[in-house]
Image (cartoon, coloured by chain):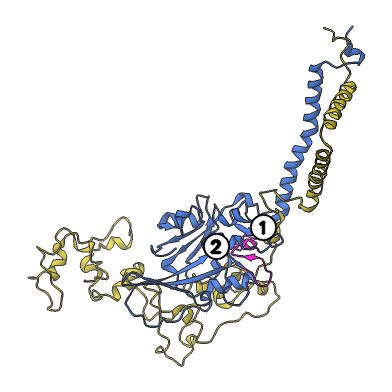
């Protein structure tokens, strides 16, 4: 089907639109026309100028400069990290890995070592003075139970720590054995309690198999009130100094360990 | 005779078809180029082996293991050149004393950079005492980013909240917005500063300096989203909580064995 002859061409239509626009534009008062021009210049100028002030990578990941990540990531490091020392000092690292200090990184005491690994720094400091070890090992009541602590004022006051303790393989007065070897936290708690002299196996019946397959063969645990009552009941045949309760009337709704932690029993 | 063949007029369908074809052919290289550009930018930004889109970092802190030695504070200040003077810390350690009547006292002498001293005698008995290391919680929903008027602080694709010192105007809005008090104005640069999870170390495959320096492994660092990471293992084996959970900031620093008084 042919289009009608009198359809105006594209150019004519544009020209018509322009005429229409000019007619509408002239209808506005002059001050409005000026305002519109100013507005268009300002907004257009802003849109034109904006890209020159905003870095091209702004908004690449989000509302920020993407290369800020690169700048942050490009900063140099000072601490070389856990794995760095073994390349050269494997003898010391091997000793340390089997010791109580196995979790203490070399850089904790010797300071940042990256420059040393790069060959820019010959020797790293080693704290030999008495003040350093107490940063961790001075007795503070806030420290977790079981963490080895001393009171440095009364612990061989004139000696340097390293004259008795080799820092790469520190040894406590006695190596934990038997139950304490695995259950150190309980052992340390019990050591401070009234129950310090009660052997673990007096309450926990422990098959020899438990040492080989600890999770499958579990030690026993006293379940009833009568077990504690063997020492703590009023008519029990036990030492005079042991606190007594009347099993029949003393908080009979509970079993003992619901109120008293057997490894650190407390009384109100 | 058909007018189209003479080239005088165009039929609408032909016009639309050719417009569509030319649009697609014009846009295709732009779209492909943008993807290529994006890839190039990623590799260029961090280095070939680090892709920030592949990570989501978090940290866990075991209160029962912290001994308050302050080695993390020392390591952080060294690694990040945080001004030595007091009051400026990216990470610090607090000591809590909870008394018999339930009142709480918190102290942190110089951020615990030189550890703690034995405390003076208190009027009443101490019921519980422990240490709490603190740092920027790297919130998943960070209030500090929301308030920054210039886009100078932001959450990276790998979940770390960073500051662009070139863009920061030092207005301090983010310091007000942070519920954890993790931010400060650096007196040397006069821009805002805070923990970056040692982003420069992450990009090189290393753990943050405080994690390296902790002698008791009280700080655990790793991926939040991966099924096997030291962090996930820690979160499975421990009951973990976050600071001020009611604020919905969704922190990525998790605490185990946290006392109810800590916030």
Query: Which one is nearer the viewer's eye here, B12 or A142?
Result: B12
Q: Chain of mark 1?
A: B
> Within 10 angstroms of label 2, few (less than 14), some, or many (20 or more) residues?
many
Tag in front: 1 or 2? 1
Q: Which residue is mark 1?
A: B152
Q: Which residues are magenta?
A: B185-204
- The circle drawn on residue A222 is none
For the colour yellow, the matching chain is A
Respond whether the residues carrying marks 1 and 2 are from the same subunit.
yes
Q: Where does residue A208 sit, x and y in percent of width and height?
A: 27, 63
Left or right: where B183 falls relative to A187 = right
Q: Quadrant of the C terminus of chain B?
A: bottom left
For the colour blue, the matching chain is B
The residue drawn where x is 9% and y is 70% is: A234
Q: Main secondary structure of the magenta part?
A: loop
The answer to which of marks 1 and 2 sits earlier in the sequence is: 2
The residue drawn where x is 57% and y is 70% is: B89
User: Is residue A106 something one can see in this rendering?
Assistant: no
> Within 10 angstroms of label 1, few (less than 14), some, or many (20 or more) residues?
many
- Measured in 3D between alpha carbons, the distance from the residue under mark 1 to the one under mark 2, in whole angstroms, is 16 Å
The residue drawn where x is 11% and y is 65% is: A247
Q: Quadrant of the N terminus of chain B?
A: top right
Q: Quadrant of residue B31?
A: top right
Secondary structure of the residue carrying tag 1 is: loop
């Amino acid at each position: 089907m042919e289009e009608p002859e009198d359809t105006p061409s594209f150019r004519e239509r544009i020209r018509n639109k322009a005429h229409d626009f000019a007619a509408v534009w002239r209808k506005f008062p002059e001050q409005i026309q000026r305002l519109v021009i100013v507005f268009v210049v300002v907004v257009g100028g802003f849109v034109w100028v904006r890209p020159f002030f905003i870095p091209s990578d702004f908004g690449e990941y989000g509302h920020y400069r993407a290369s800020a990540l690169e700048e942050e990531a490009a900063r140099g490091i000072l601490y070389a990290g856990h794995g760095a020392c073994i390349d050269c000092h494997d003898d010391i690292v091997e000793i340390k890995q089997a010791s109580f200090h196995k979790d203490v990184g070399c850089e904790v005491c010797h300071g940042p070592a990256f420059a040393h690994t790069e060959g820019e720094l010959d020797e790293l400091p080693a704290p030999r003075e008495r003040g350093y070890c107490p940063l961790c090992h001075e007795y503070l009541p806030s420290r977790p139970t079981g963490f080895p602590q001393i009171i440095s004022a009364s612990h061989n006051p004139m000696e340097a720590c390293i004259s008795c303790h080799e820092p790469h393989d520190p040894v406590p007065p006695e190596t934990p054995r038997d139950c304490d070897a695995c259950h150190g936290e309980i052992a340390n708690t019990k050591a401070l309690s009234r129950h310090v002299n009660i052997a673990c196996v007096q309450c926990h019946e422990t098959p020899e198999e438990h040492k080989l397959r600890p999770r499958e063969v579990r030690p026993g645990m006293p379940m009833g009130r009568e077990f504690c009552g063997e020492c703590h009941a009023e008519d029990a045949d036990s030492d005079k100094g042991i606190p007594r309760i009347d099993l029949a009337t003393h908080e009979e709704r509970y079993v003992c360990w619901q109120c008293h932690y057997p490894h650190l029993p407390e009384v109100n | 005779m058909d007018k189209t063949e003479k080239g005088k007029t165009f039929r609408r369908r032909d016009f639309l078809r050719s417009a569509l074809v030319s649009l697609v052919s014009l846009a295709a290289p732009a779209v492909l180029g943008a993807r290529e550009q994006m890839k190039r930018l990623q590799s260029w930004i961090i280095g070939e082996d680090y892709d920030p889109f592949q990570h989501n970092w978090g940290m866990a802190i075991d209160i029962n293991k912290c001994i308050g030695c302050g080695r993390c504070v020392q390591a952080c200040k060294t690694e990040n050149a945080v001004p030595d003077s007091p009051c400026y810390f990216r990470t610090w350690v607090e000591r809590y004393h909870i008394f018999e009547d339930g009142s709480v006292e918190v102290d942190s002498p110089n951020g615990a950079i030189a550890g703690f001293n034995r405390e003076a005698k208190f009027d009443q008995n101490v019921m519980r005492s422990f240490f709490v290391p603190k740092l920027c919680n790297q919130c998943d929903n960070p209030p500090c980013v929301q308030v920054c008027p210039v886009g100078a602080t932001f959450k990276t694709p790998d979940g770390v909240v960073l500051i662009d010192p070139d863009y920061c105007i030092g207005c301090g809005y983010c310091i007000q917005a942070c519920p954890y008090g993790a931010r400060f104005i650096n007196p040397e640069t006069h821009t805002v500063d805070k923990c970056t999870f040692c982003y420069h170390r992450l990009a090189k495959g290393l753990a943050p300096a405080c994690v390296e320096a902790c002698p008791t492994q009280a700080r655990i660092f790793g991926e939040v989203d991966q099924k096997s990471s030291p962090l996930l293992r820690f979160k499975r084996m421990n009951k973990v909580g976050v600071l001020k959970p009611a604020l919905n900031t969704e922190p990525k620093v998790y605490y185990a064995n946290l006392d109810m008084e800590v916030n």
